[in-house]
Amino acid sequence: MSDVVVQKIVRPERAVSGPWLEVIASNLEYHRATFLWKCEGLSDEQLRLRPVRSSALTLLGLMRHLQGVERAWFQRTLAGRTPRFFPYRTYVTADGGEWYDESDATPARDVYDDYLKACEESRQVFAEVTVDLARIVPNPEFGDTDVRFVLEHVIEEYARHVGHADLLREAIDGATGE
């Protein structure tokens, strides 16, 4: 059995015009796939590497974070449900935030499976939570926002972290790509 955690990823085409919701949905799928593309072909050990001396970020830590992004924004904020978060070990950062502790021994394959499950949970509620894009949802981080803002924020999260993943991947094995 291969020690590669994320196998071959094929990124979907993005809708670059058309109804706003279709463009947003396709861009979200594209960013999800792009993040996984940055993890493609790596082992558990490589996904845990901290290849940038000035940062504690790892690809596995970003994967843990993005499953939380999916569940917090789609399940909790938009669907009003109580999501089931995997009990990853976390710590409080200097600025009072929370981040995933890299000493968490959860195997990378399990983290990957959990991330895929979180994305699928988001896909399952997407049509339901986007019926009324102007609907206002409580948002303790930003104040009350509409559904459009939340969708844009999730894409913003992915865009930021795909950039991090790009740098981490290049530092791990030199692999680059757009």
Image (tube, rainbow, N blue to C red):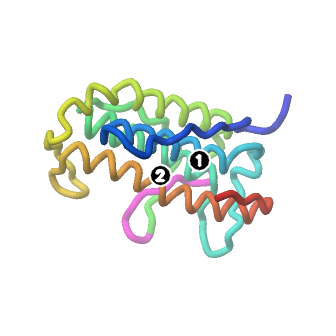
Q: Position of residue 95 (x, y in %)?
A: 39, 70
Cα gap from disc 1 to disc 2, whole angstroms? 9 Å
Q: Give the farthest residue toward the bottom.
A: 54
Determine the secondary structure under disc 1: helix
* Magenta span of residues: 94-103
Is residue 20 rendered magenta in the image? no
Q: Earlier in the sequence, mark 1 or mark 2?
A: 1
State which quarter of the image contains the N terminus: top right
In the rendered structure, the answer to whether residue 5 lies left or right of residue 114 reads: right
Q: Nearer the viewer, mark 1 or mark 2?
A: 1
Q: Is residue 64 above or below residue 120?
A: below
Is residue 96 rendered magenta in the image? yes
Q: Are marks 1 and 2 in contact (CB under 8 Å)?
A: yes
Using the image, tell me which numbered label, if any, was put on residue 34: 1
Give the residue pinned by disc 2: 158
Tell me which amino acid carries mark 2. Tyr
